[in-house]
Image (cartoon, grey):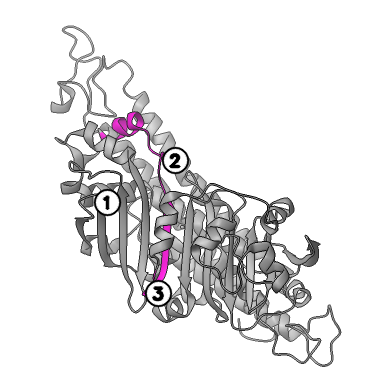
Amino acid sequence: MRFSWLTGAMCLASSLAVVQGWCGEPTMLDVLRSCPKTANAIVQGDMVALRKLTLGSPLHEDLPGNVLRVRIAAELDFKSFQPDWEIGYAAVEKIATAESIAQREGGYVDTLQGRSIVWTPNQMYLIPLADNVVSIVRPADRKFVGQWLKKDRSNVISSYLQQVAGRLTDPQSVSIAVDLEDIVSVGVMGERLLQSKSLQGKNIEAIAKSLAAVQGITISVAKDALQATVLIDFQSAPTELTPVAKAFFAEVLTARGMQLDEYAQWSMRAVSEGKTLEFTGPIASETLDDLLGMFTVHRASSGVTKSDSPAGQTAGQTAGQTAGQTSPSVIAENTREYFKKIINIAHRVRDYSANNTGERAQWNGNMANRIDEMPTLDVDPQMVMYGAEVAKSLRNNSMSMQLTNISQGAAAVAADAGTSGFSTATGAGTMAGMGYGYGGYGSYGGNFVDPNSPMKYYSLGQAQGNTSFKELMARLEQSIADMRRTMTEKYKIQF
């Protein structure tokens, strides 16, 4: 999971205060009201608390030390769980000028609605504001930014997100909320629920209606511990679902390819007159990293810090340099840091404990996206190309495993041909479930149904996928060793 931040409004000085209608750091509700379009997701984070909670983890390395707080709104695509757009703000300790941000990020300064905006190569705009606040808009759609900067606009605010924004409090290090109203179809959901093991013998129709009436989900993590609270809100009490809700949502997580090893330790209860299912329990920093993976602000705002270099110099410059030049030592250090992150991602791919190749395929795709989002300014071009090749390899392996699973599923279905309704793929059919199936009257040899056939195809697909993954890791480990030797020899420092 990685997400985005919504038109944050801060006080650009009195003039921008007029444009956005507030001064100082905006509330989450202010951010929602400022959006040119209707947001269906929000995130609010205390980055100081998050850094303390995730110390020693890969997520901690992704959290820039200068960012204090963030508030973001976004429109999530529910198929990819990636934002179509994000707007928000980050409060930082020190902020640089638009010119120095552009220099550091490898972008350029543009002017829109009388404001200086910084275009960056990773397709977002950074807008320095007053009071050490930077606004972040993604993607880098100039018209979209222009709509945000205007005050003569209006949008429809999600009633669910409005309620959540009103109850966000300081005791959380991070809170994420998603509006799910009108997302679920009763008819489609009813058909899918028939396959759920946890719902066997339950009133499927009633449960489908409850799920179709879901309002939204809010996920919060405590400020002083990696302890999560998840609230799933419904219009009315999901009476039939509540007794089996924990087992059911475990199936949902698996189906989405999401790993939550701590879920077994979670507790669940119904609150708010039964209309809300509350889950509480520990959450690993890796899981939190996946959630925050839907958004980008925590990774995007590191370039807005005011440089500690002498006046007129930007990051990467020394007294003997002119603007636009970067010393070989700086390039070497940036390249080594980039390489360390590549290795970290490779190890996360290797160590990920997947339940099946479907989960692993999704994880590899997510890790490839991480590489693509890494800053490449003042990094050795050969190393940047290497990072791109690693990301490509992860994506190819992800696609290979997905295609293998699809082809084996198709083979299982094809094996049903001529079985007169006694399906090997589903086990449906009165006699097939007991191991007997006959395609013709009195014909014992023609169309016998093997009840273990689906599992055979599944096992074959898993074996092929795991083999391709092991081959990928062997190549990746060798390429890391080769690149380490190459860069060490080139820069005369140990990589």
Q: Position of residue 431 (x, y in %)?
A: 15, 21
Q: Is residue 295 visible?
A: no
Q: Is residue 169 visible?
A: yes
Dividing the image into 4 quarters, which one contains the C terminus?
bottom right
The span shown in magenta is 169-193
> Mark 3 or mark 2, which is nearer the start of the sequence?
3
- Circles 1 and 2: CB atoms closer than 8 Å: no
> Mark 2 or mark 1, which is nearer the start of the sequence?
1
**Residue at x 23%, y 55% (from the top left corner):** 272
237 w.r.t. 20: above or below: above
415 w.r.t. 21: above or below: above
270 w.r.t. 13: above or below: above
Q: Which residue is mark 3?
A: 170
> How far is disc 3 from disc 1 in space, using C-alphas?
29 Å
Q: Amino acid at mark 1?
A: Ala
Horizontally, is 168 left or right of 194 in the view?
right
Q: Amino acid at mark 3?
A: Asp
345 w.r.t. 155: above or below: below
Q: Which mark is residue 404?
A: 2
**In the rendered image, which quarter is residue 436 located in?**
top left
**Residue at x 15%, y 20% (from the top left corner):** 430
Horizontally, is 20 left or right of 463 in the view?
right
Disc 1 or disc 2, which is closer to the eye? 1
- Circles 3 and 1: CB atoms closer than 8 Å: no
